[in-house]
Image (spheres, rainbow, N blue to C red):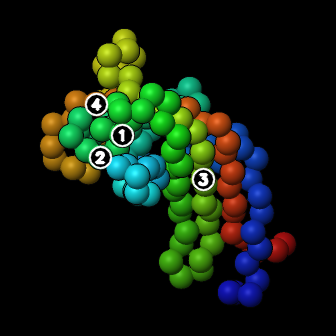
Amino acid sequence: MENQRVPIELDPKLALGLLGQIEFGRVAFVSDGRPTIRPLNHVVVDGQIIVHTRHTTAFAQAVRGHAGLRVAYHADEIEKHSRLGWSVLVSGTATDITDDRRAERLGPQVRSWVNHPLDTVIAIEPLEVTGLRLTVPR
């Protein structure tokens, strides 16, 4: 099976749709001049990736410190034994929307794995969406 896997490029709309079917991904950004990657829960709403976090996190601080912070967001779902599945990478800009009217509705949609009070809603606006599906030839 291992040699039979074939990567197929995904249409950006389909890739974003797959991202919307799962709750967990990783955000990459620069914090204090260093590349940083953090795991996050998310939802996809109206083409944006929405995260609900705490204002004390490195991600929230970086977003508040740099309007339109450039970020990458990655998620995948690859089955352990067959190694089949998909991977999606989004490049975009992150904005703190906590004070936006939508935040009260969007924040609670994100089901966090962390049992801390969450007070910051961040929207990632995709500029580029790419994805691959690992499948077997038919």
Q: Which amino acid does the dot numbered 1 rest on?
A: Ala
Q: Which residue is drawn at 26% across and 51% down?
A: 113
Q: Which residue is drawn at 56% across and 26% down?
A: 46
Where is the C terminus found, in terms of image quarters? bottom right
Badge number at residue 120? 4
Q: Which amino acid does the dot numbered 3 rest on?
A: Leu
Q: Distance between the residues labelled 3 and 4?
A: 23 Å
Q: How far apart are marks 3 and 1 (CA)?
A: 20 Å
Q: How far apart are marks 3 and 2 (CA)?
A: 21 Å
Mark 3 or mark 2, which is nearer to you? 2
Question: Disc 3 vs disc 4: Cβ atoms closer than 8 Å?
Answer: no
Q: Which residue is drawn at 51% across and 44% down?
A: 71
Question: Disc 1 vs disc 2: Cβ atoms closer than 8 Å?
Answer: yes
- Name the residue furthest top: 101
Q: Residue at x 68, y 87 (%)?
A: 2
Q: Residue at label 3?
A: 89
Whole-percent x, y for residue 69 in the image: 48, 36
11 is higher (above) or lower (below) than 103: below
Left or right of 71 on screen, residue 62: left
- 3 or 4: tag closer to the N-terminus: 3
Q: Which amino acid does the dot numbered 2 rest on?
A: Ala
Left or right of 85 on screen, residue 121: left
Mark 2 or mark 4, which is nearer to you? 2
Quadrant of res 135: bottom right
* Disc 2 element: helix
Q: Residue at label 2?
A: 58
Badge 3: how crowded within 10 Å, few (<14), some, or many (20+)? many
Q: Distance between the residues labelled 1 and 2?
A: 6 Å
Question: Disc 3 vs disc 1: Cβ atoms closer than 8 Å?
Answer: no
Badge 2: how crowded within 10 Å, few (<14), some, or many (20+)? some
